[in-house]
Every structure is written in structure tokens, then in C-alpha cells.
Image (cartoon, helix red, strand yellow):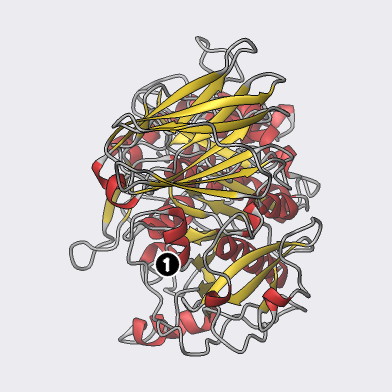
């Protein structure tokens, strides 16, 4: 493990993301980092843990934008037949069920005692759990993760191996030996959809029921970051650097076990340029460059929530007013707001409060932070201009509203240097802001959450498998740099899956909605495809781009729509609405020789008759 003389999970330490390849404000030899601990993530990134009292107050005036960890939240609101999974199980050439592959989960943990995550003999299918929340006492020096390879470990959290989990399952009190719990349920649910086993009565099956699992239980974000981003105290929030370290752990496990790896990320954030250049996004890109590694990411549930504004200021107009309605909850706490220039334009801002108090145009002073206390109300707005944000080259205006007055606020946006006059603004993602604080003239497009706007990974939208309609809140593309996203849509509305509690001697079940659920379906499908390609040796040169092509070419298109489009490129259903099967079935058939493919296509009508009795037809 990394040798930190303290527990980096402690609230007494601040976390910074250091980019070796840029002129980062943090210098690894500077006085700020004296006494800091460093952990390696990739060849481009490291994490520094610094005494908190040495860096406060946190400010973009002192630190680079992307060096401060972003915060992410689960993407659902609290199926298998509709995505074509069951049909592939009934196809002998494709019935591998994900065997020999590994799906990695970065989420709220897992109920490892659930029978859906065990083999028929009762032993676990989980190869490892890295619980970042243990030990609970952050003053205690944690065991962390060992250095299985040079610089591959972690100096916080606790790892539980397959052997330890099996020992716990064989005992009368499993949690006394492996005390890792999923107290939220989101992680257990998406793990069940993607990789859960089949129940004896065939009432449920995961998408890849014979794959192996590796789980990272992410720790909750530290208080100083919650205060900086002004998010609710009880919000489920995870730090960007912890997710990056979790990806590193999954990558190490894949190398240890020599298995193809599918990384499932069912988390999202609205903060960032929305073009796949954040540290987390580029870390995912780095992993998926290699054969045998794939990432599946939820697109987000931001459409219709009025968290995005797209503005255009004509060259002959001096400014544009952007109206935001601020609700009661934000008036007590506050919120953050970001403006990103689309091209090389530069912008400046002023404000008009609900009481009519006006703040004139704040001049652009690069690297300077302006704090504006209002005279007639308790509101304080902090504005930071980043003329050229280091990773994107775009201008960023970062605004913090502390205790804003309830009512309609106007952000007056001035174009200081005109090229196209276009820009975008984003409020925080659902879960970090109430539904009372919204743009009054929002745009539903460009709402894919980070890191779903990364170019290489598969980004998954959600649709209702019962009526083939797009999920009303499924985030829309494209990215800010016009990369086509999302890539596919999968079932994500009122989907049946494992819960944490239920009647005795049963597998408790519940229903959830959101693109995280859809992404779990797709992750299982990718595991099945990688099992066919890598494990069975049918296509060992299959790249992330090839995986996308296999799935996109086989998915069902709606003849009433043009493709690609901003909602979803393809909808994964077959022709008969009462069965809603076949998209991934035909996607996989596309891999086979023509003669063999034709044989199975002729048998498809017979297979389809039995699906009426499968899981999702009962829902």
C-alpha cells in the first residue's frame, strides 16, 4: 500500500488532483505540499493529501479548477427481456452469460450476502471489495490496499478478498468478519441488474449471471468540499479522486486475474465543460485505450429538470439576461453556477437580485476572485474568471451564491470578445439542488452528465421497455464539442432488481428508474460480448470502438426517427411490443458466420414464444 503516515480519508486533510502533464497550480515540490502524502493514479494523475488548515479558504484564485475534486451522485430515482439479454442466453453460441469476464462497480457498495452474487455452491462470485469507508474511525491508520504491483496500492479504506468473503459467508455472522455494507441500495441494485445470478424460479436474472464482480464502495465526500460546492448535508456525494482511485483498483484486479474488465459508472455531475476533458474522464479514456477494457457510463437524468441554459448573444446586442428562480432551500444554503464559453469568446457578468438591487458588470481580471456582498439582503456572490481553463482552453466563469434571496435572479451576461456569441450555463445535478431552483428558459440539450460525455466509453440513455418511449429525464447530447452521445438506450424505467430488505428467506426485490439502471443492462451485455470475443477466442482484437459498433449495428432503430439524434442513437427493442426482445440478440448474431446466423434467425420465432414467461414479462 502507499505509505501515508495518516488516514487520507480523515476530514483533517484536503484532497487535490495533480496533473503531471499540465502547469498545475499545485507543485509537487512547493511549500504548500510540505507534509503531504501522494498516491499514484495513472501516468498523468496523482492525488495529494494536504492538511486542511493549510489550504483554506478553498478558492479558484489559489488552485486550478480541475485540481479541486468534483462531486458525483448516483443517477436513478428510487428490462432484461427488453434489452435482448434473455434471447442471447437461449442461443448456444452466445450463451456464455459473461463467464470469464469481470464487471467492476464504483458505487454505494454491495450486499455480498445476497444469493444473486453467489455461485451454485454458495461461494461468492465477488473477487474483491475495496471499502473506502472502513475503518469508520478516520483517526485509525487503515490497512488500505496492498501493492500487488509497483505503486498499485491505496493508503485508505479496507480491502476484502474473495477468501475473506467466503469465510464470512460460511460463518453464522458474516458482517462480523467482512463488515462492508451497502446502506443505500443503489450499488446492490445495479450490480444485480448487470451481474446478478438467476433465481431458481426464473423470476429474475442479471444480464451477465456468470461473470465475476469487483466492488469499490466509495466514501462520502468530505465536508470542506460539500461546503465549497454548497450541496445539501444529506446528499449522496462522492469525490472525483476517490472514483479515480477506484478505477485504478479495478484495473489492478483485472491484471491480477487476467480477465477482461467492464467498468460500470452509474454516477454523474453537472460541473465541468461537458466535453470529456475532466481528470475522471481522461482517466477512463486512458483505461479503455487497451484491449480487454471497456467502460459503460450512465448518461444522466437531467432532461426536463431545467439545469442547463444555452445562450447566444448577437454581435449587435450588449448583453443577455439569464433568469434563475431560486427556491427556499437554496436561499438557506446557496448553490454554485458555471458558465462555459463555446469557442474563443470571452464573457463577463453582472447581477440583478429579486429586490431590484443591481451589480454592474464585473471587470475581467484573470485569476482574481471578486466577492460581492449585497446591501439590501444577506446574499454574497463570489465570481471567479478563468480566462483560459488549463484542460479545455475555454473560458470558465465560476459563481457561488451564498444565501441568495428567494425569487427571480437575473445573471447579465456580456460578450467581451465576440466570435460566435454562444455559451452554456449549468446548475448542479439533481440531488445537489432542489427542484425549486431552475433556469426559467432552459435547454434540454447538452445535458449528459460527467463523465458520460467522454468520447471513448459507451454512454447509455434510458427508455421505457413497456411502451418503447424514451425516459422523460434521460439526458440528451451532444457534448460541448459535438461528439455524438449517448451511444445507446437500454431499459431504465420501473425496472425490477434486488433490494436490501424483504421477507425472510427470500431475495428482496424493488424497482428503480434512471439511466444508471439502463447502464447496468448495457454493462452486462458488454460482459457477454467480451466473453464471446476474448474468453472464447472469437475476437481477441475487440477494442472499445469495436464493442460500440457491434452493439450499435445490432440495436433496433425506430423508423420514425433519424439517427443519430440527441436523445438516443438506437433503441434496444425488437418488433413485437408485447415481447420487446431481440436487439442485443441480433447484435450478437452479427458476430457469427452467415450460414450459422441464418440458422438461428430462422429459429427466432420459436424462441420468442418462451420469453413470455421470463422475468420482465411478469412486471
Q: Where is residue 410 in the image (x, y as percent from the top left)?
A: 40, 28
Res 348 visible:
yes
Q: In this view, does 188 lie to the left or right of 295?
A: left
Relative depth, front residue between 287 and 190: 287
Asked if residue 140 is positioned above or below residue 399 in the image, the reply reads below
Residue 102 figure quarter: bottom right
Q: How many residues crowd around disc 1 within 10 Å: few (fewer than 14), some, or many (20 or more)?
A: some
Determine whether the residue tagged by mark 1 lies in a helix, strand or loop: helix
Quadrant the C terminus occupies: top left
Q: x and y percent of residue 37 in the render?
A: 66, 80
- Tell me: 335 left or right of 10: left
Residue 89 in view = no
Q: Name the residue under label 1.
A: 223
Camera-side residue: 403 or 271? 403
Query: Which residue occupies the foreground of this view, 71 or 145?
Result: 71
Q: Residue furthest front?
A: 375
> Does residue 176 lie above or below 328 as drawn?
below
Residue at the image point whose x is 70% and y is 50% from the top = 282
Please report the residue visible at 79 percent of the width from the left and 57 percent of the height from the top.
23
Amino acid at each position: 500500500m502507499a505509505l501515508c503516515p495518516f488516514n487520507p480519508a480523515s476530514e483533517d486533510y484536503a484532497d487535490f488532483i495533480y496533473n503531471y502533464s499540465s502547469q498545475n497550480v499545485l507543485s509537487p515540490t512547493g511549500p504548500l505540499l510540505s507534509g503531504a502524502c501522494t498516491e499514484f493514479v495513472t501516468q498523468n494523475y496523482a492525488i495529494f493529501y494536504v492538511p486542511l488548515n493549510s489550504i483554506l479558504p478553498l478558492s479558484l484564485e489559489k488552485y486550478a479548477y480541475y485540481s479541486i475534486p468534483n462531486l458525483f451522485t448516483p443517477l436513478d430515482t428510487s428490462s432484461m427481456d427488453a434489452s435482448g439479454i434473455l434471447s442471447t442466453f437461449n442461443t448456444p453460441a452466445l450463451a456464455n452469460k459473461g463467464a470469464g469476464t469481470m464487471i467492476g462497480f464504483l458505487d454505494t457498495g454491495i450486499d455480498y450476502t445476497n444469493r444473486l452474487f453467489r455461485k451454485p455452491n454458495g461461494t461468492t462470485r465477488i473477487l474483491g471489495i475495496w471499502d473506502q469507508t472502513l475503518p469508520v474511525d478516520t483517526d485509525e491508520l487503515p490497512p488500505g490496499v496492498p501493492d500487488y504491483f509497483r505503486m498499485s496500492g491505496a493508503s485508505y479504506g479496507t480491502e476484502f478478498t474473495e477468501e475473506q468473503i467466503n469465510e464470512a459467508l460460511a460463518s453464522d455472522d458474516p458482517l462480523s468478519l467482512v463488515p462492508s455494507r451497502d446502506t443505500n441500495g443503489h450499488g446492490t441494485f445495479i450490480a444485480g441488474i448487470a451481474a446478478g445470478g438467476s433465481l431458481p424460479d426464473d423470476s429474475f436474472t442479471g444480464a451477465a449471471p456468470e461473470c465475476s464482480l469487483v466492488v469499490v464502495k466509495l466514501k462520502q465526500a468530505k465536508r470542506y468540499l460539500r461546503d465549497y460546492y454548497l450541496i445539501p448535508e444529506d446528499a449522496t456525494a462522492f469525490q472525483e479522486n476517490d472514483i479515480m482511485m477506484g478505477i485504478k483498483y479495478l484495473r489492478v484486479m483485472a491484471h491480477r486475474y487476467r480477465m477482461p474488465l467492464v467498468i460500470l459508472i452509474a454516477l454523474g455531475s453537472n460541473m465541468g465543460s461537458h466535453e470529456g476533458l475532466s481528470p475522471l474522464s481522461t482517466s477512463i479514456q486512458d483505461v479503455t485505450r487497451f484491449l480487454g477494457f471497456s467502460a459503460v457510463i450512465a448518461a444522466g437524468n437531467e432532461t426536463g429538470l431545467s439545469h442547463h441554459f444555452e445562450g447566444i448573444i448577437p454581435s449587435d446586442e450588449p448583453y443577455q439576461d439569464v433568469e434563475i428562480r431560486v427556491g427556499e432551500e437554496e436561499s438557506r444554503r446557496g448553490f454554485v453556477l458555471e458558465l462555459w464559453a463555446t469557442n474563443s469568446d470571452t464573457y463577463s457578468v453582472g447581477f440583478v437580485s429579486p429586490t431590484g438591487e443591481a451589480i454592474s458588470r464585473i471587470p475581467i481580471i484573470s485569476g482574481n476572485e471578486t466577492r460581492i456582498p449585497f446591501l439590501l439582503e444577506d446574499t454574497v456572490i463570489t465570481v471567479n474568471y478563468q480566462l483560459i481553463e488549463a484542460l479545455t482552453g475555454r473560458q470558465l466563469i465560476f459563481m457561488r451564491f451564498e444565501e441568495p434571496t428567494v425569487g427571480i435572479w437575473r445573471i447579465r451576461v456580456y460578450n467581451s470578445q465576440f466570435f460566435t456569441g454562444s455559451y452554456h450555463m449549468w446548475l448542479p445535478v439533481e440531488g445537489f439542488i432542489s427542484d425549486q431552483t431552475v433556469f426559467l428558459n432552459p435547454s434540454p440539450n447538452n445535458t449528459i452528465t460527467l463523465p458520460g460525455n467522454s468520447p471513448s466509453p459507451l454512454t447509455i440513455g434510458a427508455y421505457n421497455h413497456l411502451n418503447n418511449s424514451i425516459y422523460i429525464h434521460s439526458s440528451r447530447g451532444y457534448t460541448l464539442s459535438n461528439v455524438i452521445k449517448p451511444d445507446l438506450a437500454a431499459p431504465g424505467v420501473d425496472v425490477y432488481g434486488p433490494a436490501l430488505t424483504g421477507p425472510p428467506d427470500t431475495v428482496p426485490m424493488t424497482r428503480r428508474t434512471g439511466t444508471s439502471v439502463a447502464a447496468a443492462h448495457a454493462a452486462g451485455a458488454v460482459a457477454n460480448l467480451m466473453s464471446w470475443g476474448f474468453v472464447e477466442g472469437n475476437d481477441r482484437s475487440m477494442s472499445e470502438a469495436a464493442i460500440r459498433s457491434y452493439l450499435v449495428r445490432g440495436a433496433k432503430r425506430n423508423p420514425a426517427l433519424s439517427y443519430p439524434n440527441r436523445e438516443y442513437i438506437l433503441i434496444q427493442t425488437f418488433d413485437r411490443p408485447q415481447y420487446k426482445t431481440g436487439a442485443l440478440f441480433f447484435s450478437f448474431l452479427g458476430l457469427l458466420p452467415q450460414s450459422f446466423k441464418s440458422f438461428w434467425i430462422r429459429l427466432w420465432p420459436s424462441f420468442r414464444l418462451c420469453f413470455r414467461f421470463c422475468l420482465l414479462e411478469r412486471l
